[in-house]
Image (spheres, rainbow, N blue to C red):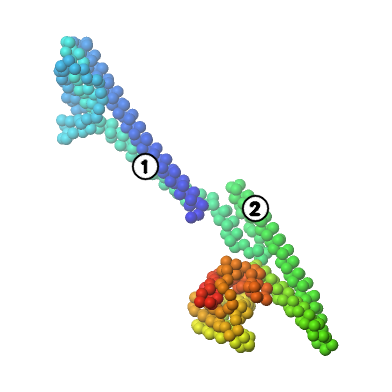
């Protein structure tokens, strides 16, 4: 859920809760005020009755009008406390009973106790409370709608600079010279965020260019002496006067120089893949590429008497021919190098996945570290970068690469 949606959700929930609680409290407060007004009116009626008795020395006649009902009952030496209560009110002009408010108590007349009971109608008061409650409800709903529309549309425009910055971050490519467009906003936080992003982008691009130049220059400078060393070693190896011991030592140096050259090329390739410097894509049939690779590695397979079985279907991919060639080379090399003589390799290509299975010495490898740089088996003479390169190529195209071990077979699976 987006930040603006979270903000709107919290704001609406809190506001609605406060408004509902306030409306309930307001409703009961209005009811209490209306009831208090009715009780005050009844108290005035009681004072008038008592005043009439004291002045005229007689009980007033019982009254039964539309809005006022008064009754008197003689008591037997029993005082009743004055109390106000809700009751029903019978209007002679209307059928049925209506809500009313009553007061009862005692008064003394001619040394005798009388109970008085005065009832007045609550209809007008209840109608007023209903009108006020209805108006309040519409005000709450109107305020809620205004708040909702304000958060949805007006505040949505307020967040546009943030989403523009976010969109530029998503589209940011460290290898492209395109700079961030400044964002115009009246919000100080968005201005500070835009300035921080601009500064970060410049620093990252500067660091990237420095690293790129260093890597390219270092790789180039390493290749030159390696080429000289290899050339001199080729000359030494062709010398017929070398003793066997000298020849073996030169062979070791030659092998080490070749390994260093391959390591240099692999590291340079990783830098290019990780920084998306290899562009271009073609429609390629993976089945045809696998068959071609099988022919290229056939001599090596035959020399180690490894049996290769395939189950391939046609699968079109839009990929860089250079990267897919490196990926297949590394998978084939890994399956052969870490296999045993007279071992087995099985390649399965389906519409959704490519699977390499190979026999080999030892137990299962650690699936958590096998694709890390310089991770290799104890008996491996490689640089430990082949599977890392495979992993990075899969990441470029969004493929899932996994490893598992079952039935003495190492399985590498790429899910497209």
Q: Residue at x 62, y 86 (%)?
A: 304
- In primary-sequence order, the first of circles 1 and 2 is 1
Quadrant of the rendered image containing residue 370: bottom right
Residue 251 placement, left or right of 59: right
Comparing 263 with 269, the one in front is: 263
Task: Check disc 2 and report its element: helix, strand or loop.
Answer: helix
Comparing 395 with 115, the one in front is: 395
Residue 277 placement, left or right of 350: right
Quadrant of the rendered image containing residue 286: bottom right
Q: From what the image shows, is residue 19 above or below residue 59?
A: below
Q: Residue at x 80, y 75 (%)?
A: 225
Residue 396 placement, left or right of 32: right
Instruction: From the image, tell me which residue sits under label 2.
Output: 196
Residue 103 appearing in the image: yes
Provide residue 388's location: percent of width, then percent of height.
62, 71
Comparing 252 with 111, the one in front is: 252
Q: From what the image shows, is residue 312 above or below residue 157?
A: below
Provide residue 239's location: percent of width, then percent of height.
83, 87
Provide residue 157's location: percent of width, then percent of height.
52, 52
Q: From what the image shows, is residue 398 above or below residue 14?
A: below
Q: CA distance from mark 1 to mark 2?
A: 46 Å
Residue 12 placement, left or right of 219: left
Instruction: From the image, tell me which residue sits under label 1.
Output: 138
Q: From what the image shows, is residue 80 above or below residue 261?
A: above
């Amino acid at each position: 859920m987006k930040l603006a949606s979270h903000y709107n959700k919290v704001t609406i929930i809190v506001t609605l809760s406060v408004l509902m609680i306030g409306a309930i409290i307001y409703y009961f407060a209005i009811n209490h005020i209306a009831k208090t007004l009715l009780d005050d009116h009844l108290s005035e009626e009681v004072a008038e009755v008592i005043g009439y008795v004291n002045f005229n020395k007689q009980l007033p006649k019982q009254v039964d009008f539309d809005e006022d009902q008064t009754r008197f009952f003689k008591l037997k030496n029993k005082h009743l406390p004055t109390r106000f209560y809700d009751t029903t009110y019978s209007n002679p002009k209307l059928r049925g009973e209506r809500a009313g408010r009553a007061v009862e108590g005692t008064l003394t007349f001619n040394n005798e106790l009388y109970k008085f009971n005065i009832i007045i109608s609550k209809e007008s008061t209840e109608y007023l409370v209903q009108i006020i409650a209805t108006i309040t409800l519409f005000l709450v709903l109107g305020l809620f709608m205004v708040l909702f529309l304000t958060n949805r549309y007006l505040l949505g425009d307020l967040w546009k600079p943030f989403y523009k910055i976010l969109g530029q971050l998503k589209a940011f490519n460290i290898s492209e010279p395109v700079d961030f467009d400044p964002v115009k906003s009246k919000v100080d936080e968005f201005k500070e965020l835009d300035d921080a992003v601009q500064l970060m982008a410049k620093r990252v691009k500067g660091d990237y260019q420095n690293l790129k130049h260093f890597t390219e220059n270092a790789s180039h400078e390493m290749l030159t002496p390696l080429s000289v060393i290899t050339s001199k070693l080729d000359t030494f190896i062709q010398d017929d006067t070398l003793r066997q011991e000298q020849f073996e030592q030169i062979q070791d140096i030659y092998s080490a120089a070749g390994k260093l050259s391959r390591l240099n090329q692999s590291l340079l390739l990783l830098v290019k893949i990780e920084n998306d410097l290899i562009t271009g894509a073609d429609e390629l049939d993976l089945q045809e590429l696998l068959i071609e690779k099988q022919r290229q590695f056939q001599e090596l397979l035959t020399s180690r008497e490894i049996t290769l079985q395939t189950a391939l279907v046609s699968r079109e991919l839009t990929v860089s021919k250079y990267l897919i060639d490196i990926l297949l080379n590394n998978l084939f090399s890994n399956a052969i190098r870490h296999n045993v003589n007279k071992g087995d390799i099985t390649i399965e290509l389906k519409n959704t996945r490519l699977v390499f299975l190979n026999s080999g010495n030892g137990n299962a490898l650690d699936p958590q570290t096998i694709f890390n740089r310089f991770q290799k088996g104890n008996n491996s003479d490689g640089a430990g970068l082949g599977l890392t390169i495979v992993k990075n190529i899969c990441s470029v195209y969004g493929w899932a690469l996994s490893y598992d071990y079952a039935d003495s077979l190492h399985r590498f699976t790429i899910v497209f």
